[in-house]
Image (spheres, rainbow, N blue to C red):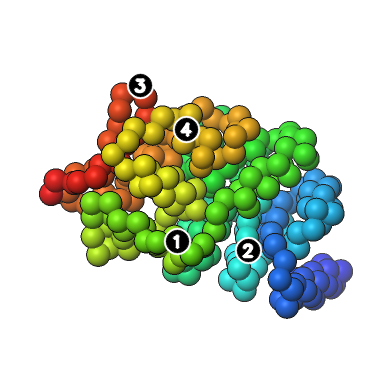
Amino acid sequence: MFASCAVRLDHTQMRRDLTRYDTLDEVRLLLVEDDAPLATVIERGLIEEGYAVDRSATVADANEFLRLNDYDLVVLDLGLPDGDGVDVCRGVRRSEDLVQAATPILMLTARDSVADRVQGLDAGADDYLPKPFAYPELAARVRALLRRPKATVSPVLVVGDVTLDPAAHTVLRGAILVPLTAREFSLLDYLMRNAGDVCRREQLLDHVWDANYDGLSNVVDVHIANLRRKLSLPGVDDPIETVRGVGYRMMTAVAS
Ligand code: CA
């Protein structure tokens, strides 16, 4: 009896949370973390910085929030009681809603093996923060992810058969729409704006990540690999060339 009562209360609370920010033009974050004390610390910190925060502790609730709302950023724990945060991340990236599919995701987890980090990035996370962490670091990473240019009015970029529309936040390879994460989009945008020139890894880190980024040293390579996979077309050359030991170059013409 107590259990069913508690469930009903949770749902009432959730409905209230779901509608709380609907009319406000605020930067809105979704926090998915099942460690209640930790979630409270993060939530309070983010609210204090002026963000609107929705909070969920399960995969199911996170998916429900995402179904109902658009977020500017998701802070996502990996180990959740009813599943894996990686699946929430994949769900966002596969969304047919292109705005939602581009939502920046900061993964938050106790796991710290390289394989787990790579899995998180492969699933579409934009950044990764291993626990334990100091709150100011989380706040700085949130700010860095939110600072990235969003849809701004700027001309459509065309390099070879790749078309990138900064305003619509869409990428086409030929006539095929290519869904990219926000980070992959920024990376491609930078490569295309410098098409024909070699972009060094440090240069890409500085421009696409934060100048103070001190995460994985291979983060550029991981994102380039994802970008290539998504842009690949059978029988058509890779539009991004690897310049050994230096970085990457967007090809101005692609042989088909
Ligand atoms: Ca957890």
Q: Marks 2 and 3, how far apart in space?
A: 38 Å
Q: Marks 1 and 3, how far apart in space?
A: 33 Å
Dot 3 amino acid type = Gly
Label 1 neighbour load within 10 Å: few <14, some 14-19, many 20+: few
Instruction: Point out the tag, 4 or 1, that comes first from the N-terminus.
Output: 1
Dot 4 amino acid type = Gln
Where residue 187 sits: x, y (%)? 44, 45
Label 4 neighbour load within 10 Å: few <14, some 14-19, many 20+: some
Of all residues, the one furthest to the right in this rendering is 2
Find disc 1 in the rendering and name its residue. 154
255, above or below 173, in the image: above
Instruction: Point out the tag, 4 or 2, that comes first from the N-terminus.
Output: 2
Between circles 4 and 3, the one closer to the viewer is 4
Find disc 3 in the rendering and name its residue. 245
Left or right: residue 168 versus residue 61 is left
Residue 214, image quadrant: top right
Where residue 105 sits: x, y (%)? 58, 51
Between circles 4 and 1, the one closer to the viewer is 1
Label 3 neighbour load within 10 Å: few <14, some 14-19, many 20+: few
Is the CB of the residue bearing disc 4 within 8 angstroms of ligand 1? no
User: Residue visible at 48% across and 64% down?
Assistant: 153
Where residue 155 sits: x, y (%)? 40, 61
190, above or below 181, in the image: above
Q: How many marks?
A: 4
Instruction: Point out the tag, 2 or 3, that comes first from the N-terminus.
Output: 2
Name the quarter where the N terminus is drawn: bottom right
User: Residue visible at 44% across and 67% down?
Assistant: 168
Asked whether disc 4 touches disc 3, contact meaning CB atoms under 8 Å apart, the reply is no
